[in-house]
C-alpha cells in the first residue's frame, strides 16, 4: 500500500517491478519501466470507471472528476521475445482491482469463442435460442464473464479467427471490455499475407481505436542471458538440482506465473505453471497422466521452453509412463524445443528394464535425443531461432492457412 494524491491505494506495477530490480531478480530496464508506469495509469482509469458505477458518494466524486462515460482504452504491447512483456502484463492482471477479469492465451480464447459459436448454432437448430447470428450472444457471454481481458501471445494465423475477430471484438468493446495484450508483432503485421487479409484490416483499425499501441523496444533478451549460464539436464534429482530448476524457472518467469489450460479436441490439458512461452511440469503430470500425442503436440505448439521435474528411472513395471516419456521427448525434439530436466539418472541410464523389450530399443533413441538437446549446437540454434521477433513465422503460417 502507498499514498497517491492523498488517497491510500493498492500496490502498483511499478512497485512490484522496482522490488524485483532491487532484489536482483531482474535487471532494471528503462523501456520496461515506461510500460509499468503506463499499466499503472490504466489501472487508475479502470478503478475510476469501476467506482463511478457504484452508487456511493466516492463513486460520484470520481465520476465528476473524470469523464468516465468514455470507454477505457486498453493496451497492446509488442516487442521481441524475452523482453518482459508477459511479466509486466501478469503484474497488471494480479493488481487490477476487478473481479471479472480473465488472463488467457489468445489461441485458447479463440478456441473458447469458436466452441461457444458452435453451441449456439446447435441450440438454434434445436429451437432453444432465437438469435440466428451467434456473435452477439457469444460476445455477451464473454463480456459477462470478464470485462478486463489479458491476452498473451496475440497472434492471428488462422483464417477462421481472422474472419470473426472484427465483429466479435466490436461487440466486446461496445460492452465495455478493456483489452491488454502482448504480442511479438505490431498490429499492422498481424495476419500479414493471410488469405482475404483485406477483410481483416477492419479489425486492425478497431484494435487501434480501442487500445493504445506501445512497443517494448528493449534490445536485450533477459531470459536468454540468464539461462545461457545454466545446465539443462540436472542429475541426480536432489536438493541441488531442485534449486537449479527453481533458478531456471525464475529466469523464464520473472517470478510471475499462472495456471493455464490448452484446448485439445474438446478437452482441456492443464498447465500447472505457465509464464509466457514457458511451462513447468512434473514428470507425473506429463507421463503418469493419460496424455497422448495430440496433447504433447499442443503443449509444444504453445510453448518453446519446458521444464520437467523429477524424471525417474523407468522399467517394464511402468510401461505406460515410459511410452509417454518416449513420445514426449520425440515431440520436444521434433519441435526443436528447449527442455530443462531434473532426473534420477543420466539419459543413457533412465531405462532399467529388461534388454530386448520394445521400450528398451525405443529408449536408446530417447537417450540419444536428450543428449543432443543438451548440446551447445542445439541450444545456440534454439536461441538464434527465438531471438527473432516471431513475425516471419506468423506470416508464413498465415500464408499457408
Image: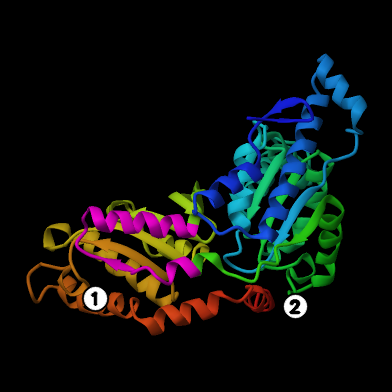
Determine the image quadrant of residue 93. top right
Closer to the camera in the image, 4 or 223: 4
| Residue 330 drawn above or below residue 180 | below
Identify the magenta region: 225-252
**Labelled pair 1, 2 in contact (Cβ < 8 Å):** no
Q: Residue furthest bottom?
A: 377
Closer to the camera in the image, 340 or 129: 340
Decide if residue 331 is on the left or right side of residue 208: left
Decide if residue 109 is on the left or right side of residue 365: right
Separation (CA) of disc 1 from disc 2: 41 Å
The residue to which callout 2 is attached is 193
Which of the numbered marks, if any, corresponds to residue 346?
A: none
Residue at 83% in and 50% down: 210
Query: Can you give x and y, in whole percent of width and height, for residue 375 in the image?
Result: 34, 81
Marks 1, 2: nearer the viewer: 1
Decide if residue 391 is on the left or right side of residue 263: right
Q: Quadrant of the N terminus?
A: top right
Closer to the camera in the image, 131 or 233: 233
Disc 1: CA contacts within 10 A as few (<14), some (14-19) or many (>=20): some
Under tag 1, what secondary structure?
Answer: helix
The residue to which callout 1 is attached is 367
Is 74 a magenta residue? no
Residue at 30% in and 78% down: 369
Tell me which label, 1 or 2, sits earlier in the chain: 2
Amino acid at each position: 500500500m502507498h499514498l497517491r494524491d492523498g488517497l491510500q491505494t493498492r500496490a502498483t506495477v511499478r512497485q512490484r517491478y522496482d522490488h524485483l530490480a532491487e532484489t536482483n531478480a531482474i535487471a532494471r530496464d528503462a523501456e520496461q519501466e515506461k510500460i509499468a508506469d503506463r499499466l499503472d495509469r490504466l489501472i487508475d482509469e479502470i478503478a475510476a470507471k469501476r467506482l463511478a458505477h457504484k452508487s456511493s458518494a466516492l463513486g460520484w466524486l470520481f465520476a465528476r472528476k473524470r469523464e468516465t462515460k468514455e470507454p477505457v482504452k486498453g493496451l497492446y504491447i509488442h516487442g521481441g521475445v524475452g523482453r518482459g512483456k508477459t511479466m509486466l502484463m501478469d503484474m497488471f492482471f494480479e493488481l487490477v482491482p476487478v473481479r471479472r477479469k480473465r488472463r488467457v492465451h489468445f489461441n485458447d480464447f479463440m478456441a473458447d469463442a469458436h466452441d461457444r459459436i458452435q453451441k449456439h448454432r446447435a441450440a438454434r437448430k434445436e429451437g432453444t435460442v432465437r438469435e440466428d447470428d451467434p456473435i452477439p450472444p457469444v460476445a455477451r457471454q464473454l463480456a459477462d464473464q470478464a470485462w478486463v481481458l489479458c491476452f498473451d501471445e496475440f497472434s492471428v494465423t488462422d483464417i477462421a479467427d481472422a474472419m470473426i475477430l472484427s465483429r466479435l471484438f466490436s461487440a466486446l468493446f461496445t460492452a465495455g471490455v478493456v483489452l491488454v495484450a502482448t504480442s511479438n508483432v505490431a498490429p499492422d503485421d498481424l495476419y500479414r499475407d493471410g488469405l482475404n487479409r483485406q477483410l481483416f484490416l477492419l479489425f486492425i483499425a478497431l484494435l487501434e481505436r480501442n487500445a493504445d499501441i506501445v512497443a517494448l523496444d528493449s534490445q536485450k533478451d533477459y531470459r536468454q542471458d540468464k539461462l545461457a549460464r545454466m545446465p539443462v539436464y540436472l542429475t541426480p534429482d536432489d536438493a541441488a538440482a531442485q534449486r537449479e530448476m527453481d533458478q531456471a524457472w525464475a529466469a523464464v518467469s520473472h517470478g510471475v506465473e499462472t495456471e493455464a489450460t490448452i484446448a485439445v479436441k474438446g478437452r482441456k490439458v492443464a498447465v500447472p505453471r505457465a509464464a509466457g512461452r514457458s511451462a513447468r511440469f512434473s514428470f507425473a503430470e506429463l507421463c503418469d497422466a493419460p496424455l497422448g500425442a495430440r496433447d504433447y503436440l499442443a503443449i509444444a505448439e504453445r510453448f518453446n521452453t519446458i521444464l520437467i521435474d523429477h524424471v525417474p528411472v523407468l522399467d517394464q513395471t511402468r510401461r505406460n509412463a515410459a511410452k509417454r516419456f518416449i513420445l514426449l521427448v520425440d515431440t520436444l525434439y521434433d519441435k526443436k524445443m528447449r527442455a530443462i530436466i531434473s532426473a534420477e539418472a543420466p539419459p543413457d541410464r533412465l531405462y532399467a528394464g529388461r534388454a530386448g523389450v520394445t521400450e528398451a530399443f525405443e529408449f536408446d533413441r530417447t537417450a540419444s535425443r536428450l543428449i543432443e538437446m543438451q548440446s551447445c549446437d542445439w541450444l545456440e540454434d534454439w536461441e538464434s531461432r527465438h531471438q527473432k521477433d516471431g513475425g516471419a513465422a506468423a506470416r508464413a503460417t498465415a500464408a499457408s492457412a
